[in-house]
Image (tube, grey):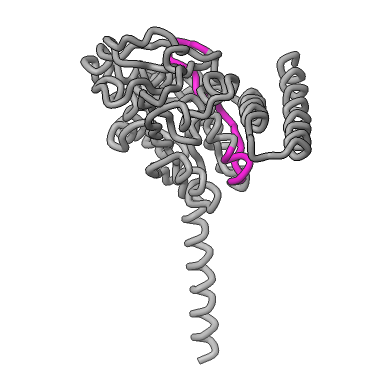
């Protein structure tokens, strides 16, 4: 009986170890909700299938209704890797044990992309100043609160630096993904909305009639290209396989069909990836703190002493990141 029990116990240990090994080789890949899940799956599945084939890992797409769902998924290890914008990547690095390891590259070779504000083509609005008349007569579409181009950039460069609260400026403010905001503008459901140049390229490709009904009135400074983030606690073996896949895919170092790989990347509006690190988030950190300082300056609920202390702390953080950014830029 003891021999049987020992045998069963050993089998249990082996089964547990095998299950753990199986789980360790599963990569749930988070994809932020910039457009409909079906569109995203169509664009991403060929790349994830290639990753599965080349690395031997079981790569599965992971979708959520908003950016926070992907960040929280990574935080609780339901997501091991993800494509983020820079703002959501910053949240994943700070709160979900994430680390940037590669960066996307636009198929046109541009080093990044731009946030834009768009209006219906036949709208009388010609400038961003006309949007900011703040008489609560307009409906405005912002992006997901964790979106770089849809939220952080317009909040920093359009609203915060003019001490404007969108909720007090407009009749109604909605938060939606890039595709939904673009369609809302094209169909005149909102008077203006934040978006980005990458999303506009996709709308032009997938829905040219809608694109014809949209006009850009404002463009931001350049935003660094989107990062891919993994959890720091992935095994070094798996990290090595994943890194090699991303840095060789679609290049002359690939062992596959390079032309086919380039076509798959082009479906995502990308060229081959390049190596990156958390340092690419430094401009976003500076931007986030610039927005926070402006909002604190305009916060009527804070007394003078509390406001001064908070601004001093935020300014010190900003100076620290600016120094790091300057150091990176000169290397």
Residue at the spot 72% in from the left edge and 39% down from the top edge: 303
Q: Nearer the viewer, residue 16 or 2?
A: 16
The quadrant where residue 196 appears: top left
Q: Decide if residue 251 is on the left or right side of residue 43.
A: right
Q: Is residue 287 visible?
A: yes
Q: Decide if residue 300 is on the left or right side of residue 115.
A: right
Residue at the spot 51% in from the left edge and 60% down from the top edge: 20
The quadrant where residue 87 appears: top right
Residue at the spot 38% in from the left edge and 28% down from the top edge: 141
In this picture, is 98 found above or below 137? below
Q: Quadrant of the C terminus?
A: top right
Q: Nearer the viewer, residue 278 or 213?
A: 213
The quadrant where residue 262 appears: top left
Q: Is residue 251 visible?
A: no
Residue at the spot 59% in from the left edge and 33% down from the top edge: 100
Q: Nearer the viewer, residue 311 or 322?
A: 311
> Residue 307's spot in the image, x, y percent?
73, 36
Question: Hey, which residue is sitting farthest top in the picture?
Answer: 126
- The part of the chain drawn in magenta is 91-110
> Residue 192's spot in the image, x, y percent?
37, 20
In this picture, is 154 found above or below 75? above
Q: Decide if residue 166 is on the left or right side of residue 120.
A: right
């Amino acid at each position: 009986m003891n021999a049987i029990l020992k045998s069963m116990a050993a089998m249990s240990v082996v089964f547990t170890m095998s299950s753990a090994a199986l789980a360790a080789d599963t990569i749930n890949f988070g994809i932020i909700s910039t457009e409909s899940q079906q569109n995203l799956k169509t664009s991403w599945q060929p790349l994830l299938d290639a990753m599965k084939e080349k690395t031997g890992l079981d790569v599965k797409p992971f979708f959520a209704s908003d950016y926070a769902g992907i960040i929280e998924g990574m935080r609780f290890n339901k997501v091991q890797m993800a494509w983020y914008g820079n703002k959501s990547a910053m949240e994943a690095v700070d709160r979900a044990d994430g680390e940037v390891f590669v960066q996307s590259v636009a198929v046109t070779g541009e080093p990044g992309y731009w946030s834009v504000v768009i209006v219906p083509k036949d709208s009388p609005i010609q400038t961003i100043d006309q949007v900011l008349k703040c008489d609560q007569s307009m409906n405005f579409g912002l992006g997901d609160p964790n979106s770089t181009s849809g939220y952080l950039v317009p909040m920093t460069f359009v609203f915060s630096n003019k001490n404007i609260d969108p909720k007090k400026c407009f009749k109604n403010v909605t938060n939606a993904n890039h595709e939904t905001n673009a369609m809302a503008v094209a169909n005149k459901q909102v008077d203006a909305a934040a978006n980005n140049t990458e999303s506009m390229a996709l709308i032009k490709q997938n829905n040219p009639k809608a694109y014809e009904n949209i006009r850009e009135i404002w463009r931001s400074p350049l935003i660094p290209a989107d990062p891919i983030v993994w959890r720091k606690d992935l095994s070094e073996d798996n990290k090595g396989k994943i890194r090699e896949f991303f840095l060789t895919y679609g290049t002359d170092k690939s062992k596959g069909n390079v032309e086919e790989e380039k076509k798959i990347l082009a479906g995502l509006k990308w060229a081959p990836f390049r190596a990156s690190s958390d340092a690419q988030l430094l401009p976003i950190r500076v931007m986030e703190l610039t927005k926070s300082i402006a909002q604190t300056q305009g916060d009527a609920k804070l007394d003078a002493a509390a406001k001064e202390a908070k601004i001093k702390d935020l300014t010190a953080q900003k100076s620290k990141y600016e120094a790091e950014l300057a150091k990176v830029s000169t290397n």
